[in-house]
Amino acid sequence: MELHFYPGQKLLVVKDSHNIQHPFDAWGGPSTTGNDPHMKPIPTTAGTYIIASTGPYSTQTWSWSKIKWGTKLKDMPHKKDVWYQLSSGKWGSVKKDIGINRTEIMKRYYELYSKNVVPKKWVFNDFGPIAIRYFKDINGNRMLDKNERLSGEMIHTTPENEAQSQSGNTVTLAESHGCIHVKPKDRNKLHTMGAFKSGTTFIVHKYSERL
């Protein structure tokens, strides 16, 4: 099985052992570098990669992504704060640790789900519940070695698309900063098919290439 991404056609394609192709909608970065002052959107980098892993992702680069998707929350209205559960089981302050206050959390949740409450879990991570990580395999052993590194680009959903899917609305994909955006139900189907299994070959084609 191989996984292929054609950014020019906005298609993520699974080629199975019988060479049957299974296409899914997917959006990468722009074909030319953008001008977002926080982080410039870039074209998704062409090349041959190996799928490394799947799992919740967090990063210090984006405020809403400093907490992993699904992290338990505790509403603390009397403190005008929301607490989140740490890996130790203890609780930390979102306002103090992340710099996002209770009002901002409620506003963001309302934008996504039209409910004016603090959710029970963190559903704001820009990379969705799981991110599929991949790397360029320098020595060809299909394993991530110490002289190799994970790509900063990855396959994932977005909070907007997760909310659309959960609410039963049409899922509308949008251009990324270089990652590959997929629909939640497609991610689940691809995962079930084994397309994200560690060691799977993943080819990102040039924008001019066609299926």
Image (spheres, rainbow, N blue to C red):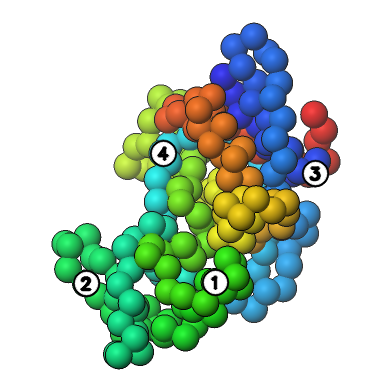
As measured in the structure, the alpha-carbon distance from the residue carrying label 3 to the one carrying label 1 is: 37 Å
Q: Tag 4 or tag 1, which sits nearer the N-term? A: 4
Which image quarter is the C terminus in?
top right
- The residue under label 4 is 53
Q: Tag 4 or tag 2, which sits nearer the N-term? A: 4
As measured in the structure, the alpha-carbon distance from the residue carrying label 3 to the one carrying label 2 is: 45 Å
Residue at horizontal 68 percent and vertical 30 percent from the top = 13
- The residue under label 3 is 8
Viewed as shown, does residue 70 lie left or right of 194? left
Instruction: Please tell me in which quadrant of the rendered image residue 108 appears.
Output: bottom right
Residue at horizontal 21 percent and vertical 72 percent from the top = 91
Which image quarter is the N terminus in?
top right
Q: Which mark is residue 185?
A: none
As measured in the structure, the alpha-carbon distance from the residue carrying label 1 to the one carrying label 4 is: 34 Å
Q: What secondary structure is found at the residue carrying circle 1?
A: loop
Instruction: Please tell me in which quadrant of the rendered image residue 18 appears.
Output: top right
Q: What secondary structure is found at the residue carrying circle 2?
A: strand
Q: Tag 3 or tag 4, which sits nearer the N-term? A: 3
Q: Tag 2 or tag 3, which sits nearer the N-term? A: 3
Residue 122 picture location, percent across and down: 41, 64
Q: Tag 1 or tag 2, which sits nearer the N-term? A: 2
Instruction: Please tell me in which quadrant of the rendered image residue 189 appears.
Output: top right
Residue at horizontal 40 percent and vertical 51 percent from the top = 56
Camera-near label (1 vs 4) is: 1
Residue type at tag 3: Gly
Residue 201 picture location, percent across and down: 54, 27
Q: Are the residues tagged 3 and 1 within 8 Å (C-beta)? A: no
Residue type at tag 1: Lys
- The residue under label 2 is 91
As measured in the structure, the alpha-carbon distance from the residue carrying label 2 to the one carrying label 4 is: 28 Å
Camera-near label (3 vs 2) is: 2
Residue type at tag 4: Ser
